[in-house]
Image (cartoon, coloured by chain):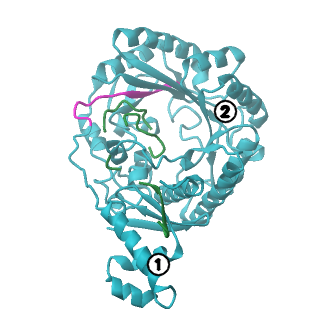
Amino acid sequence: MERIHKFQLNNKNIILDINSGAVHIVDKLVWDIIDLYENNKFEEIIRMLYNQYETQDIKEAYEEIQVLIEEGLLFSDDLYVNDFNYNQDNIVKALCLHIAHDCNLRCAYCFASQGDFSGDRLLMSSEVGKKALDFLVKSSGSRVNLEVDFFGGEPMMNFEVVKELIKYGREIELKNNKKFRFTITTNGLLLNDENMNFINENMDNVVLSLDGRKEINDYMRPTLNGEGSYDIIVPKFLNFVKLRSNKSYYIRGTFTSKNLDFSKDVLALNKAGFNTISVEPVVASREKDYALLEQHLDKILSEYEELSKEYIRLKQEGKGFDFFHFMIDLNQGPCFIKKIVGCGAGVEYLAVTPEGHLYPCHQFVGDEDFKIGDVFEGVKNNKLINKFKNANIYSKNECKECWAKFYCSGGCHANAYNFNKDINKPYSIECEMQKKRVECAISVQANISKEE
Amino acid sequence: MKHIKTITRHKIGGCGECQTSVGNQSCENK
């Protein structure tokens, strides 16, 4: 397979050494030589390029390439680490608690079918929630850091149980040498000073759902009586973020085929007063009139590029903000194991329904084929767990050959299944978007980083 | 170097103590 990936973006010629992770910004001469390097001798390269460049310059550039190769920073080989015994002990370290299968908005694109996941509208009882926390502690082996995300539906519709579970979690973590990290995802409608203060004291992160420009948000995210939600929610979110002070939050929007110019929504959210922003492609079946299809891809990719230009400009002017997909740590990132296996869904991370049933992740909830057990008796479907455990960048043919595999980690299992009926066959539109985001993120670093 | 500027110089895990998620999260076990 290819060992380097080269691209031009935001006024930079960039070469990524795929297998080492080294990133180089090069001039036009190196850009031209690099394509010839592997299959031609030095004298042949001179002959091919002498009409365009001075021989001395070609020699210098060629030698610089050689130095980087010797240092393992260019044309390095794939490590192909595939015998790493991922999670041999079947440890579970994170749960997504579906605290409410009910919602007070009627978002058109909701993958949870407006909150009920195509089932009855249900709230999780504190008994089921406590069983879930007990299951997590029991299943977590020697892991200390455990995570619990309160999700829905709209989790604020069952906030008394949320409070009870946090109290219970704090009681059992001390006894068991564990540390819970609680997070919540909310549409904000039910936020008030009292519950915001509670969340700020107890939640490490909050995800606040809002789509961007008012007209875009209100078209897709109406209230129960069909009115827009923007004017109700934005003042609450601004107050919430202010009260959170330095604690982390994400404003999280969704774009659809109705707003392919989504960079305007990202920038509108920043202009409205938010500094950590994520606006994500809708997950929807092809027949929906807002679904993202192949014919939208060119526009989506150019929109990410447009956003990256403006993002760099704002950063350079000292007015920058954080966009989820443009934040990339080229100097470290996650460990190699995590780069290979990805999110851990169906292995280390499970979702729990209000009744206590276990699923590989929140996106699989409601599909009976993916039920893997319950919090009362634990995991029963080990065959399914093993299937998820063995799905990684070296088990997926498309990923093995992909330059972005160490940044994408194989993509979303749920998307792969929803579109291809196979968790080992990545969803191609998602792949193209992810590759473009990685290029944009690297180009951001190329424009704001210093040389090492 | 005159022609190449290197801005970052994967191999360098699996403790499982980090947050579930991938690309922008950094291992704290450096």
Name the tint of chain A in the rendering: cyan
Disc 1 marks a residue whose amino acid type is: Asp
| Numbered badge on residue A105 | 2
Q: Position of residue A427 (x, y in %)?
A: 44, 56
Q: In this rendering, would A336 be left or right of A183?
A: left
Seen at 59% across and 57% down, the residue is A447
Residue A94 lies in what quarter of the image?
top left
Give the magenta part as a residue range: A87-100
Q: Secondary structure at mark 1?
A: helix
Q: In this orientation, does residue A357 appear?
A: yes
Seen at 26% across and 39% down, the residue is A86
Seen at 35% across and 22% down, the residue is A144
Q: Position of residue A441 (x, y in %)?
A: 54, 53
Residue placed under numbered mark 1 in the picture: A32
| Numbered badge on residue A256 | none
N-term mark: 2 or 1: 1
Q: In which chain is the residue bearing label 1?
A: A
Disc 2 marks a residue whose amino acid type is: Leu
Task: Establish if A251 lies above or below A32.
Answer: above
Q: In which chain is the residue bearing label 2?
A: A
Which chain did the image draw in green? B
Query: Camera-side residue: A53 or A191?
Result: A53
